Structures are given as structure tokens and as C-alpha cells.
Amino acid sequence: MIAQNMFLGMIGPWQIVLIVVIVLLLFGGKKIPELMRGLGSGIKEFKDASKEEEKLEGGNETKS
């Protein structure tokens, strides 16, 4: 019972604030938008590649 309560409430609002402050201190305010842009473009490329794979797999099934 105690272990269950411990795992359910591990990350709260104060922990999130602490993580944000640490990230700001490590990277600075100017580098964070660059990091987010890079992360966003990486996710977009991943989605495009997965869609392309689905198209290739779908085309191969109809030819067989």
C-alpha cells in the first residue's frame, strides 16, 4: 500500500518547476528554442519516414 502511494505521486508540480529551472540554468534561455526546433524537426522527419515506409509496404502488397 505504501509503495503504491509512493509511485503514484512521484512527479508533482514542484518537481516539474525544479526540472525547468535546472534546464534553464544548464542551457540558458537562448539555446532552448534552438533545442526545441531541432527536436521538432527530428519528430517531423521520423513521421515522414514512417509514412513513407507505410506507402512502400502498401504498394508491395498490391503487386504480389
Image (cartoon, rainbow, N blue to C red):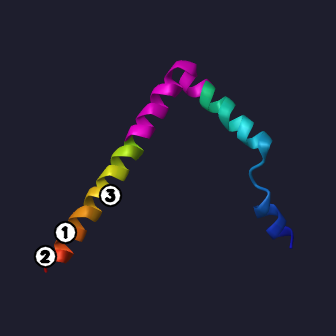
Count residues near mark 1 (Cα–Cα under 10 Å), then give few for <14, some for 14-19, many for 20+: few
Given residues 49 and 39, the one toward you in this image is 49
Please tell me which of labels 3 and 2 falls first in the chain.
3
Q: Which residues are magenta?
A: 25-41
Question: Distance of mark 2 from mark 1, alpha carbons?
Answer: 7 Å
Q: Quick one: quadrant of the C terminus?
A: bottom left
Q: Circle 3 sits on which residue?
A: 50
Q: Secondary structure under badge 2? A: helix
Q: Is residue 34 left or right of residue 63?
A: right
Count residues near mark 3 (Cα–Cα under 10 Å), then give few for <14, some for 14-19, many for 20+: few
Given residues 62 and 50, the one toward you in this image is 62
| In this rendering, the label closer to the viewer, 3 or 2 | 2
Q: Residue at x 44, y 39 (%)?
A: 40
Q: Amino acid at mark 2?
A: Lys
Question: Distance of mark 3 from mark 2, alpha carbons?
Answer: 20 Å
Residue 47 x, y percent position in the rendering: 37, 52
Q: Circle 2 sits on which residue?
A: 63
Q: Residue at x 39, y 38 (%)?
A: 41
Kindly give the residue lying farthest to the right in the view shown: 2
* Vertical order, 40 against 6 (above or below): above
Q: Secondary structure under badge 1? A: helix
Q: Quick one: quadrant of the N terminus?
A: bottom right
Q: Residue at x 49, y 23 (%)?
A: 31
Quadrant in which residue 53 is drawn: bottom left
Cβ atoms under marks 2 and 1 closer than 8 Å = yes
So how many labels did they put on this image?
Answer: 3
